[in-house]
Image: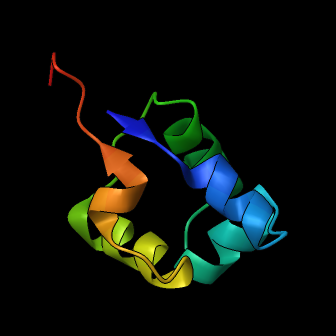
Amino acid sequence: MENTIKVERAKLNLTQQDLADLVGVSRQTINSIEAERYIPSTTLSLKISKIFKTTVNEIFKLDEDD
C-alpha cells in the first residue's frame, strides 16, 4: 500500500512528531507508515485523513499486489 502522508505533511508544514501528536500515536508510527512498513488501522487512517481534510482513498493507494 502506497501513501502520500509525507507530501500531505509538507503541504501543512507538519513534522512527523506534529502529526503523531495530532492523531495520538508515536513519531515512529508515522515514520513506519510513511516508509510503508506499517499499515495503519481504519481508525488511524480516518484520523490522518481528517487532519489533511481529504479522504482515506486520496492518502492511501492499494498496489496491484494488495
- Drawn side of residue 25 relative to residue 40, left or right: right
- Drawn side of residue 59 relative to residue 56, left or right: right
Q: Quadrant of the C terminus?
A: top left
- Drawn side of residue 3 relative to residue 66, left or right: right
Percent x, y of residue 52: 55, 76
Residue extending farthest to the top is 65
Asked whether 21 or 59 is in front, the reply is 59
Query: Is residue 60 shown above or below 37?
Result: below
How is colour applied across the structure in the image? Answer: rainbow
Residue located 67% across and 51% down the image? 7
Percent x, y of residue 48: 47, 71
Query: Is residue 48 shown above or below 65?
Result: below
Percent x, y of residue 2: 40, 34
Percent x, y of residue 44: 37, 68
Instruction: Report the label total.
Output: 0
Quarter residue 39 falls in? top left
Residue located 78% across and 59% down the image? 10
Q: Quadrant of the N terminus?
A: top left
Residue located 35% across and 49% down the image? 60
Query: Is residue 14 shown above or below 28?
Result: below
- Drawn side of residue 36 relative to residue 34, left or right: left
Asked whether 34 or 53 is in front, the reply is 53
Quarter residue 61 falls in? top left
Residue located 33% across and 74% down the image? 46
Query: Is residue 9 shown above or below 30?
Result: below
